[in-house]
Amino acid sequence: MKTLFSRLRSRRTPAGEEVTDSVLASSMFPADDAAPMVDWATRAAELKAHPLPPAEAAERMLQLWRADQPLGSLGDDAPARLARWLQGADVPADRELLKQDEIGDHLLVLLEGRVVVERKHPNGTATRLMEARAGDLLGEMALFDGGPRFSACRTLTPCCVAVLDSAALDGLLAEDSPLAAALLVSITRRIALRLRQTGARLSALLAPQ
């Protein structure tokens, strides 16, 4: 599994170009080749985020995802196992959790609060893509493919997040493959659900009036 994950992050197009968040997104909204790499420690300092104990972040995350299988059937020790690989933070309102076009090595799980996800345009306007709530993923595509972040994520209220970075995911894959597999299934299902919702919205927009 670790080898597969590493291949996903280094995957390239036939032309030798890095794959970004999606083929559709990269073709419609070209990314800056000089996008900066920003890790969670750097962003947390910018946000003046208050650290949350990993055990609490893991417990709250699993409570939100407890209905997921096989994650929900891992046993009572799952929070302690997951806590080894997670970070957590409390973030004030009106802070930019993730910035558009930067390169990120981490995803966030929103544990509490509300976050707006928006695409900013060169003319200064922004398109609101969605409003994330507790249990939602943020920034997962950049973690998996190593490409620039397609959108910005800004806290609307004080928020609590769990953080999983690429080094932690590599360690989890190597040392606790059952937990890693269950976690990746849950993440994949959430990505699939978001794609279905996006497809439904596009169908409604493109339907003949």
Image (spheres, rainbow, N blue to C red):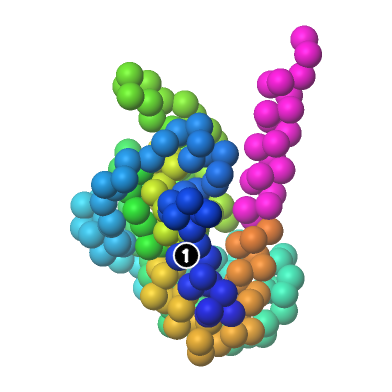
Looking at the rendered image, the quarter that the N terminus falls into is bottom right
* Residue drawn at x 47%, y 26% as measured from the top left: 127
- Residue shown at 78% from the left, 13% from the top: 208
Q: Around disc 1, counting alpha carbons within 10 Å, would you say few (fewer than 14), some (14 to 19), or many (20 or more)?
A: some
Q: Residue furthest top?
A: 209
- Asked if residue 190 is positioned above or below residue 177 in the image, the reply reads above
Residue 123 on image: x %, y %: 33, 19
Residue at (68% x, 52% y) in the render = 192
Q: Residue at x 29, y 61 (%)?
A: 39
Residue 135, picture quadrant? bottom right
Q: Is residue 24 above or below residue 162?
A: above
- Which residue occupies the extreme bottom position in the image? 175
Task: Considering the whole magenta stretch, tell me its main secondary structure.
Answer: helix
List the single residue furthest toward the right. Answer: 208
Q: Nearer the viewer, residue 162 or 103?
A: 103
Per the image, label 1 sits on a secondary structure element best described as: helix
Q: Nearer the viewer, residue 1 or 72?
A: 1
Image spot of residue 9 (x, y percent) = 47, 65
Q: Is residue 26 visible?
A: yes
Q: Where are the magenta residues, as a range?
A: 190-209
Q: Quickly name the residue at label 1.
A: 9
Residue 50 seen in the figure? no
Residue 141 image position (x, y, % from top left): 50, 54
**Quadrant where the C terminus lies?**
top right
Q: Quadrant of residue 10?
A: bottom left
Q: Is residue 136 left or right of residue 166?
A: right
Q: Is residue 195 above or below residue 176?
A: above
Asked where in the image residue 76 lies, by quadrant, the reply is bottom right
Q: Is residue 128 magenta?
A: no
Say how many tags the image has. Answer: 1
